[in-house]
Amino acid sequence: AYYKAQYLRIQATYLLDSRDVDIQQNGIRLMERIVTDYPNEESSTIFGYEQLGDYYLKYKEFEKAEKYFRLVVKHYELKQSRGGTSALADLKLAEILLIGGTVNQLEEAYKICKSYPLEKLLMNSDKFYYTQLLAHICFKLNKTEDAKEFAKAAIELSKVTKPQFSRHKTVGLVSASNQQLKDLQQIVDD
């Protein structure tokens, strides 16, 4: 069962990455099949949930993405472990809540980010994601000074050009868009 679930998840991953929408739909069906056919294979199902959340986030289907990220976050809480995932599903959930933008969603997003175990942020790219996310959340919650501090930290992380691993020249490097940096600078200057 372990190998079958893993094989299906790998196949589904390739299909989800396709540019063809019909092929992507086959990837979704395969990923959902893992959950129904192999529910006891936690490593495949939890990572599959996160991959579905990522897929729906990418295509701006926020309600579906939120559903899957909440399943992963629930797993984090129940198992007291982030193993088998990117360890960032709760931050991705916070990103969706930020996009929603209601006061309750923003408060929940803030709470999620502030309770995130910072020792899990090993890569500069993950630290950037965390700080820029909190900068935007704090800004929308009128926590201006906090927003500025997080925005400054994110900007500084974007300036790091030295790889964290000598054999992997791009792993962990921040690839912030000009718009992201402009938005962060605007928070600092506000």
Image: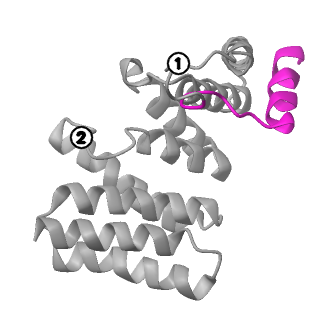
Disc 1 to disc 2, how far (Cα)?
30 Å
Quarter where residue 30 is shown? bottom left
Outermost residue on the bottom side: it is 22
Q: Position of residue 153 (x, y in %)?
A: 67, 13
Q: Of the residues tagged 1 and 2, which is closer to the observer?
A: 1
Number of numbered discs present? Answer: 2
Residue drawn 58% across the image and 27% down it:
169
Q: Is residue 141 left or right of residue 163?
A: right
Give the quarter of the figure containing the N terminus.
Answer: bottom left
Relative depth, front residue between 66 and 20 = 20
* Disc 2 target residue: 77
Q: Amino acid at mark 1?
A: Gln
Q: Are marks 1 and 2 in contact (CB under 8 Å)?
A: no
Relative depth, front residue between 144 and 42 = 42
Dot label at residue 110: none
* Disc 1 target residue: 164
Residue 49 against residue 89 in the figure, above or below = below
Q: Amino acid at mark 2?
A: Glu
Q: Position of residue 22 (x, y in %)?
A: 57, 88
The region drawn magenta spans 170-190
Q: Position of residue 110 (x, y in %)?
A: 53, 31
Residue drawn 36% across the image and 61% down it:
49
177 within the magenta span: yes
Residue drawn 68% across the image and 29% down it:
141
Quarter where residue 4 is shown? bottom left
Sequence-wise, the earlier of marks 1 and 2 is 2
19 within the magenta span: no
Classify 10 Å Cα crowding around label 2: few (below 14), some (14-19), many (20 and above): few
Quarter where residue 176 is shown? top right
Give the quarter of the figure containing the C terminus.
Answer: top right
Q: Is residue 147 left or right of residue 80?
A: right
